Image: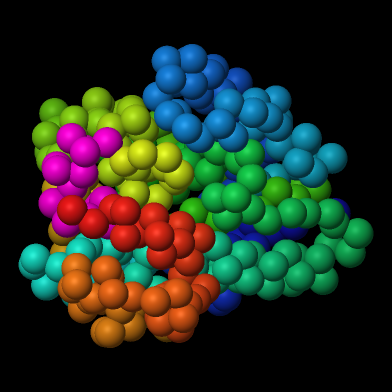
Amino acid sequence: MILSADAVKGIARAIGFDAVGIAPAALLSDEVNHLRAWVAAGKHAGMGYMARNMEVRENPERLVPGAHSVVVTLTNYYNSSRQAEGIPQIAMYARGKDYHLVIKERLHALLQQLRELAPGMEGRCFVDSAPVLEHAWARRAGLGWQGKHTLLIRKGLGSYCFIGVAVITAEMDAYDAPFTASYCGTCARCVEACPTGALSPGEVDARKCLSYQTIENKGDYPEELKRLAGGRIFGCDACQEACPWNKELAEHSVADFRPSPEAMNLTAADWQAMTPARFKALFRDTPLERTGLERLKRNLG
């Protein structure tokens, strides 16, 4: 059965996604070759999973046999409120419920409704937790371009968006044209704003990246990088804050992403004195839970 692309997008928007595009399932050979070069240069740091499953990242049929279409969604998480200066800082994306849980629930709802339109359709959904090149698929689906900070940018939504991907066996009556333009121009404010020099235009060196160091790195946190962190204990928004496309954005409308005022106002002393029980009460089902209390205490300046 061939589905109406307009109908699919209408369903996705009704579920609550802020933007949706659809690409034909195809090989991502150029993108995977770039990833291989990045890994070969050691810029993936300790993220060994980035070096695995290259053939799966390249070919969506390795994820869903008989795949014909890739539906890509964007969900705004922008919030204009800011933490007070001088207290440990948490990246904006992590201030509410874990986006993996929220977006995957919505994607499952989307798949369920598509199966009702196309009985027998097979499909899987992915939210930053499988060998899927989400940013590449978002560009293939016409949703935006890769900024010099490496994140997807869409006019009107900026880069504060979660990307969801559904790979399905149904065909569409129309597909979106890939987004091949870039509207960064000569601007390099994101690169200049990076506290540790981890960014070069279009590429990040995770070995220097504060997001990697404060979230993913289970080993020693280099003191020279910790000194440059500016109080960031989970993630870093410096490059996004500097991007002109992230000015005057609309607030997100997802209740689950609203932060707890108590959690957002913790001082360094509060963090040092925090017990596992209090941490669980404050941060259960948030991105911070996976990193854990001990590593967050390690990240304090």
Q: Is residue 126 above or below residue 43?
A: below
Quarter of the image holding residue 53?
top right
Residue 146 image offset from top left, x and y in percent: 36, 37
Residue 246 image offset from top left, x and y in percent: 21, 55
Q: Is residue 73 above or below residue 180?
A: below
- Residue found 14% across the figure and 42% down from its top: 228
Coloring scheme used: rainbow
Nearest the viewer among 227 and 64 is: 227
- Residue found 32% across the figure and 60% down from its top: 297
Nearest the viewer among 111 and 90 is: 90
Residue 48 colored in magenta in the image: no
Q: Looking at the figure, which quarter contains the N terminus?
A: bottom right
The reply to whether residue 17 is in sight is no
The reply to whether residue 247 is in sight is yes
Q: Is residue 257 above or below residue 167?
A: below
Nearest the viewer among 173 and 26 is: 26
Nearest the viewer among 6 and 248 is: 248
Residue 226 colored in magenta in the image: yes
Quarter of the image holding residue 67?
top right
Residue 171 image offset from top left, x and y in percent: 76, 47
Q: Residue 149 vs residue 190: left or right?
A: right
Residue 4 image offset from top left, x and y in percent: 69, 58
Outermost residue toward the left in this view: 85
- Residue found 63% across the figure and 71% down from its top: 105
Q: Which residues are magenta?
A: 222-237
